[in-house]
Amino acid sequence: MQAQIQTRYSDQELAEFKLIIDAKLADARKQLQFYLDQLTEQANSDDSKLRGLDDGTSTSANEELHRLANRQQQLIQHLENALLRIQNKVYGICRMTGELISADRLRIVPHTTLSIHAKQNR
């Protein structure tokens, strides 16, 4: 008797991954809001208006906050895309090999679309 190869995760497994992604998405949105609040605070600060271009540290801090905010926005987009893959029942399938990505990898990096093997051979 041959063992049947699993071609997709079960609905129960997808529900587990959805909980993980929902939690990570909530954290990512909270972090993004923090960065956006910091940027707004810097923009409205009387101190930064007085210094103007004389002090490069505020510009550097501002650029870093923008970079971090952009990174969070990308993470949010990746997590939202993962939720769509769950909805379409194609979540956890490696986009290069077509095989299932290990559940352990998906628990750590729930928005991944590549198995470890595919990522290493890229």
Image: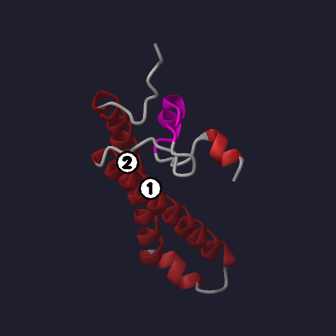
Kindly identify the residue that appears in the image at 48 percent across and 61 percent down: 74
Is residue 37 positioned above or below 46 on the image?
above
Decide if residue 96 is on the left or right side of residue 88.
right
Asked if residue 111 lies in the magenta stretch, the reply is no
Q: Which mark is residue 35?
A: none
- Depth check, mark 1 against mark 2: the one in front is 1
Residue wearing tag 2: 25
First to last magenta residue range = 99-110
Q: Which mark is residue 78?
A: 1
Sequence-first tag of 1 and 2: 2
User: Is there CB contact under 8 Å for labels 1 and 2?
Assistant: no
Q: Number of numbered discs present?
A: 2
Q: Observer-nearest residue: 59 or 15?
A: 15
Decide if residue 57 is on the left or right side of residue 8.
right
* Residue 30 picture location, percent across and down: 37, 51
Colouring mode (rainbow / by chain / secondary structure / one colour): secondary structure
Q: Residue lying at the far right in this picture: please name it.
A: 121
Q: Residue lying at the far front in this picture: please name it.
A: 1
